[in-house]
Image: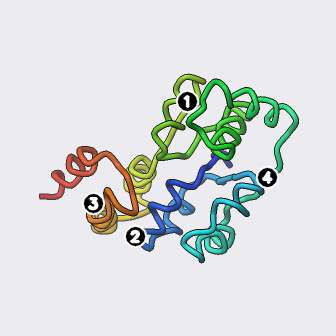
Amino acid sequence: MEYISSDTSVWIDFSAIDRIELPFRLPYTYIMNSDAINDELLSPVHLRGELLRCGLISVELTLEEFDLAEEFGPRYPNLSIYDRIALAIAKVRKIILLTGDGALRKAAKCENVGIWGTIGVLDQLLDGSYINGDEYKFCLLELQKRNGREVRLPKNEITVRLQHFK
């Protein structure tokens, strides 16, 4: 089983379209620092419980991850402590970072950490036949409706994918 270090943004996207369980169909184990789970997954109210029920794994930081997250502070001042922690976990453990946060994605690229986001997860779900075309299209349409409000995704990426269904 491959591990994926996660921040909160992608989970908020899937929660906004009532499809929080979809990423858990993929053959990955999503991990998040225990403090981030307790402090960041507060809204919507049910998000933390749903993610833990679906299989999100709480992890503690190693000393190396803690030190690296601290080093990231001055290097990436726009990142929250939990963003720096998610990045440090991904870098130290040499795993993918799951995020839709622009500043975090930029920092991950600088650190040579692989990144997946909401749309990438949907693409994998479709490509691996974990969802069908109708479910994929539904998710894209729902994300498109909420884009700019509850979710912040590249509009053109959604549009390009929806054009394949016209």
Among numbered discs 4 and 3, the one appearing first in the sequence = 4
Question: Going 53% across and 60% down the picture, which residue do you hit?
Answer: 11
Where is mark 3, residue-wise?
144
Q: Residues within 10 Å of mark 2 (few under 14, many from 20)?
A: some
- The image's mark for residue 156 is none
Of labels 2 and 3, earlier in sequence is: 2
Is label 1 or label 4 in front?
Answer: 1
The amino acid marked with disc number 2 is Ile
Q: Nearer the viewer, mark 1 or mark 2?
A: 1
| Label 3 residue SS | helix
Judge by depth and name the residue closer to the eye, 121 or 155: 155
CB atoms of marks 4 and 2 within 8 Å: no
From the image, state whether disc 1 or disc 3 is nearer to you.
1
Residue 91: horizontal and vertical position, in percent? 68, 31
Question: Circle 1 sits in a helix, a strand or a loop, which is it?
Answer: helix
**Disc 4 and disc 3 in contact, CB within 8 angstroms:** no
Give the residue type that dot 4 points to.
Val
Tell me the SS state at disc 4: strand
Q: Which residue is mark 4?
A: 59
Q: Residues within 10 Å of mark 1 (few under 14, many from 20)?
A: some
* Residue at image location 88% in from the left, 35% down from the top: 63
User: Residues under labels 4 and 2: Cα distance?
Assistant: 27 Å
Tell me the distance, in whole angstroms, between the alpha carbons under discs 2 and 3. Answer: 10 Å
Horizontal arrangement in the rendering, residue 37 relative to residue 131 (left or right): right
- Residue position for label 1: 107
Q: Quadrant of the C terminus?
A: bottom left
Q: Is residue 36 left or right of residue 136?
A: right
The residue wearing badge 2 is: 17
Residue at screen point 44% across, 74% down:
18
Residue 68, x across and y down, in percent = 76, 29
